[in-house]
Image (cartoon, rainbow, N blue to C red):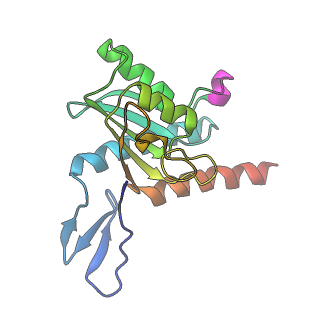
């Protein structure tokens, strides 16, 4: 699993660019991934913000095919009264419908939080080759935190995982949501 390192300035000429929170090294972008990865993760964050506005746990996801978003989703568990209405499940379903295929072998999934067991299972069954996520989920993450089903060689399909992209933004949105919930209760 590849993780984006957390660079601070530390006197080494690093500074942050606000547009995509891309680190700069002496004024030049220090991109750990292609620009498109940040753009698509930003789209997933936008979906998470929609969930936040709807009083849903703010998690967003997009599925990309040929450098184009073909499926997107945000958590709708409360809205639909459906425990399976996670952002990843909705985005995968939309992408499968878009391509008229249950397999998404030429696609990538971008999600703001490490997928749970259910969502990781859906990613495996859809045969997505790559998964990019923001923050780790230490309580139910199935892509490295608690389990790592995505890279389990015992399964007939494994997924290449990239993590830490917009991790702070993802964590901050989740923290804001749960802080708001605690204030209400």
> Residue drawn at (44%, 37%), measured in percent from left and top?
154
Q: Nearer the viewer, residue 174 or 162?
A: 162
Instruction: Using the rendered view, name the quadrant where residue 104 is placed.
Output: top left
Determine whether 148 is above or below 17 in the image.
above
Determine whether 134 is above or below 77 in the image.
below
Q: Position of residue 16 (x, y in %)?
A: 32, 70
Q: Position of residue 142 (x, y in %)?
A: 53, 44
Q: Nearer the viewer, residue 155 or 175?
A: 155
The answer to whether residue 172 is seen in the rendering is yes
Q: Quadrant of the N terminus?
A: bottom left
Determine whether 106 is above or below 147 in the image.
above
* Residues rendered magenta in the picture: 77-83
Determine whether 148 is above or below 156 in the image.
below
Q: Nearer the viewer, residue 4 or 45?
A: 4
**66 horizontally vs 160: left or right:** left
Instruction: Using the rendered view, name the quadrant where residue 61 is placed.
Output: top left
């Amino acid at each position: 699993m590849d993780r984006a390192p957390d660079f601070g300035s530390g006197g080494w000429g690093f500074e942050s660019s606000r547009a995509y929170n891309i680190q700069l090294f002496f004024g030049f972008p220090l991109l750990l991934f292609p620009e498109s990865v940040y753009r698509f993760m930003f789209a997933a964050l936008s979906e998470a913000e929609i969930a936040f506005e709807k009083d849903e746990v703010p998690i967003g996801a997009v599925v990309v095919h040929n450098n184009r978003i073909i499926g997107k989703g945000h958590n709708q568990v409360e809205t639909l009264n459906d425990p399976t209405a996670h952002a990843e499940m909705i985005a995968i379903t939309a992408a499968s419908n878009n391509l008229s295929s249950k397999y998404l072998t030429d696609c990538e999934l971008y999600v703001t939080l490490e997928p749970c067991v259910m969502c990781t299972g859906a990613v495996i069954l859809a045969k997505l080759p790559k998964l990019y996520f923001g923050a780790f989920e230490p309580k139910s993450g199935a892509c490295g935190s608690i389990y790592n089903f995505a890279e389990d060689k015992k399964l007939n399909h494994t997924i290449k995982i990239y993590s830490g992209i917009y991790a702070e933004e993802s964590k901050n949105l989740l923290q804001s949501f749960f802080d708001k919930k605690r204030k209400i209760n």
